[in-house]
Amino acid sequence: MSGVTTAWMMVAAALAAVLASVGTTLAQQSVPDTVEAHVRAATVAAGLDLGGILTVCLPRNGPDPRPANDAVEPMKVFDNLYYVGIQSVSAWAVTTSDGIIILDTLNNAQEAQTFIEGGLRKLRLNPAQIKYIVITHAHADHYGGATYLADKFHAQLVMSDIDWTYLESPPQRPEAPNRGPIPKRGLSVKDGDKLTLGDTTIEMYVTPPHTPGTLSLIIPLKDGGMQHFAGEWGGTAFNFAPTLENFKTYAASAERFAKIAADRKVDVPLSNHPIFDDALLKMPALKARKAGQPHPFITGAASEARYLTVAAECAKARAAALNEKN
């Protein structure tokens, strides 16, 4: 049995024990550096409403299987934010006073054409207004449709300089045949850079190691004239080399982005995979929302902090498992 498998089994066993006993109140105290303590902290932080992000504590053997029918109807989520993704991976459209910013592009050209271009048209938005395409990280389920959209609508691709370089290096792993081509280098951004289009500015922060240059975003939103901010955690799953250094880097990135999110008053946790932010559960609730009722995606600053605490503590649990194994 490999060391990685042993570490996963330790975390899974700790999670099972914690789920059987833990309450839902987050204690403000330091966490002992043990697998069980970190899994308990993650589970307490998740409470009853953040089960999606808590799944990063679970063992993961390869990519998650895609559903037979991956389609999702596009939806207006905020006055200036639209879901144009699928069940297995998200794509978002941010509308501004001077055009549209697309966040991630799904797996390939066909999906980009059907769900992003086609989704915008269903929502009575003009895809010719796409000006920028932000790729949160250098995995093909996020850049697969980028070349198609950029070429057709003359849009500017945006990714971290680190991840552009990563894509230009020798292949790190083989890609599935249904993934689109690696896009040509576009606009390169660094940690803390801002992308402004019209009346909207998106902040971008480099948060490795999901990829070396993963971007997490602060996105201004509007709901009936009220200002809100989303924090999109750009790379969630532990699909990097399972080293102690990587898990420590992940936890540090999550904790740093949590501080940035708190400073920006983020009250909408977002992900680029709907399994993690429960977007597909919130969308029907939003559709049924009546005047005066809470917005299902606006879960508050404490929720954003808990979301990133779960991510950090799950990474710390994996690091502790590696330490305990040694």
Image (cartoon, rainbow, N blue to C red):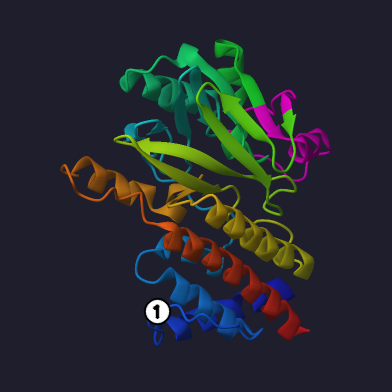
Q: Assign a secondary structure to mark 1.
A: loop
Where is mark 1, residue-wise? Answer: 25
Screen quadrant of the C terminus? bottom right
The total number of labels drawn is: 1
Frontmost residue, 286 versus 113: 286
**Disc 1 packing (10 Å; few <14; some 14–19; many ≥20):** few
**Residue 290 in view of the camera:** yes
Q: Main secondary structure of the magenta part?
A: loop
**Image position, residue 210 (x, y; %):** 67, 52
Residue under the image location 58 percent in, 43 percent down: 217
**Image position, residue 289 (x, y; %):** 19, 44
**Residue 104 in view of the camera:** no
Frontmost residue, 145 versus 75: 75
**Image position, residue 251 (x, y; %):** 66, 65
For the record, the magenta segment spans 158-187
Q: Quadrant of residue 8?
A: bottom right
Q: Quadrant of residue 134?
A: top right
Frontmost residue, 35 versus 10: 35
User: Is residue 244 positioned above or below 83 on the image?
Assistant: below
Q: Quadrant of residue 80?
A: top left
Q: Is residue 160 magenta?
A: yes
**Image position, residue 188 (x, y; %):** 74, 30
Q: Is residue 276 magenta?
A: no
Q: Residue furthest left?
A: 290
Q: Residue furthest right?
A: 170
Tag 1: amino acid = Thr
Classify residue 194 as left or right of residue 75: right
